[in-house]
Image (cartoon, rainbow, N blue to C red):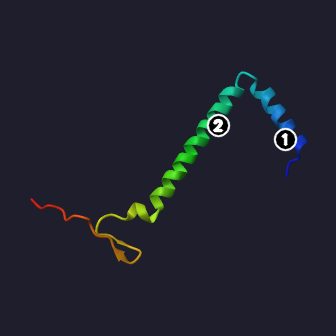
Amino acid sequence: MFGLSELALILLVVVVVLGVKKLPELTRSAGKAARIFKSEAKALKEQDSPEAHAGPGRVVAGTVVERDEPAARS
């Protein structure tokens, strides 16, 4: 992999190429992208959990989940 001196050199080249003015914008957008990615991953994890699919009257892990109160029929 890369050593510390190689990473420092790459960082220096990025700063020179992009310029000091663009660096805050770049880090801000990278942080925003990381937050969006984290929230989407969390949403997918919650969506795939068995609790998300456990609605009234559905079979979950071999058991039927019943409603607390029967629905009133009109």
Image-quadrant location for residue 29: top right
Q: Choose between 67 and 4: the one closer to the eye.
A: 67
Q: Quadrant of the C terminus?
A: bottom left
Label 1 and label 2: CA atoms lie apart by 18 Å
**Other-residue count near label 1 (Cα within 10 Å), few / some / many at <14 / 14–19 / ≥20:** few
* Residue on which disc 2 sits: 30
What amino acid is at disc 1?
Leu
Rendering coords of residue 55 (x, y %): 33, 63
Q: Are marks 1 and 2 in contact (CB under 8 Å)?
A: no
Q: Is tag 1's residue or tag 2's residue first in the polypeptide sequence?
A: 1
Left or right for 67, reference 33: left
SS at circle 2:
helix
Left or right for 47, reference 59: right
37 over 23 or under it: above or below: below
Image-quadrant location for residue 14: top right
How many numbered dots are placed on residues in this image?
2
Rendering coords of residue 13 (x, y %): 83, 32
Left or right for 31, reference 39: right
Residue projecting furthest to the bottom: 62
29 over 64 or under it: above or below: above
* Residue on which disc 1 sits: 7
Seen at 85% across and 52% down, the residue is 1
Image-quadrant location for residue 36: top right
Seen at 75% across and 27% down, the residue is 18
What amino acid is at disc 2?
Ala
Left or right for 8, reference 58: right
Rendering coords of residue 49 (x, y %): 47, 62
Rendering coords of residue 28 (x, y %): 64, 31
SS at circle 1:
helix
Residue projecting furthest to the top: 21
